[in-house]
Amino acid sequence: MELTKYTHATVVLTKGEHTLVIDPGAYTPNSAELVAHTTAVLVTHDHPDHFDAAVLGAALDAQPDLRVWAPANVAAELGDRDGRVTTVTAGDAFEAAGFAVQVVGGDHAVIHADIPLMRNVGYVVDGNVYHPGDAYFVPEESVQTLLVPTSGPWAKLGELVDFVRAVHPARAVQIHDLMLSDAGKGSFAQFTGQLTGVELVTVPDGETITV
């Protein structure tokens, strides 16, 4: 499987002729282009850096083969679209464009006690790649490739380190990193490697690695 990292939280998985787009948000300048070249999109939650309603709505209108899987509030905003938008919750399992997907988690990480708790799901794809959205939820499933959020109003290095230790993946890839400078990304990678023994790989936007 190939993993291409795009701006912030958007990733594209490729397996043969099949692609799967995860979290094509408004912070990703080429979200519309990425969605135009796939038949399957996963959305973790409704924050604009993960979900661009205008992009997905237009794509669902233009692409009759496109399907979207997302939490209830995202699915409600997009509408049913003749069954092409599917609501998911933790514990669900399904196939999307030839990829086996398991849904985990359920809650967004706490930003502040005064902000109501929000919904967020994570996706484990082909028992290999885990995209947690905005959470450090540890799945029961064994994970080979962990996508690790490193910036945001809720992100914290100590919790990140504990997350990587608990999941204990073969490899870790930095995502959700738009708010960090190159020096910040390097700092997170250095601390994570030292404290977990797992290298936190920084993939430049638009570049691809094999997982």
Image (cartoon, rainbow, N blue to C red):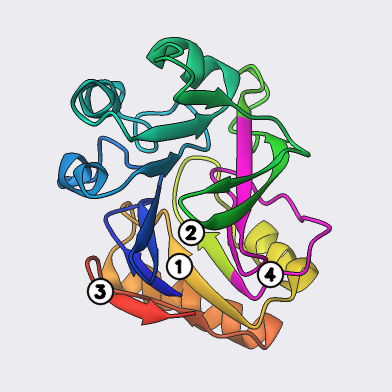
- Label 4 Cα neighbours within 10 Å, binned few <14 / some 14-19 / many ≥20: many
Q: Earlier in the sequence, mark 1 or mark 4?
A: 4
Q: Which residue is mark 3?
A: 207
Dot 1 or dot 2: first in sequence order is: 2
Specify the amino acid type for callout 1.
Gln
* Residue at the disc numbered 1: 174
Q: Label for residue 155? A: none
123 and 191: which one is in front?
123
Which residue occupies the foreground of this view, 173 or 67? Answer: 67
Give the residue at mark 4.
164
The CA span between labels 1 and 4 is 11 Å
Asked if labels 2 and 3 touch by Cβ distance under 8 angstroms, the answer is no
Q: CA distance from mark 4 to mark 3?
A: 23 Å
Q: Is residue 19 magenta?
A: no
Residue drawn 61% across and 49% down? Answer: 123
Q: CA distance from mark 1 to mark 2?
A: 7 Å
Residue at the image point whose x is 38% and y is 76% from the top: 202
Residue drawn 67% across the image and 51% down it: 136
Magenta span = 120-145
* Secondary-structure class at tag 1: strand
CA distance separating discs 2 and 4: 12 Å
Mark 4 or mark 3: name the one nearer the start of the chain.
4
Question: Relative to residue 66, is residue 174 drawn left or right?
Answer: right
Residue 198, picture quadrant: bottom right
In the picture of the structure, the residue carrying the numbered disc 2 is: 150
Mark earlier in primary sequence (3, 2) = 2
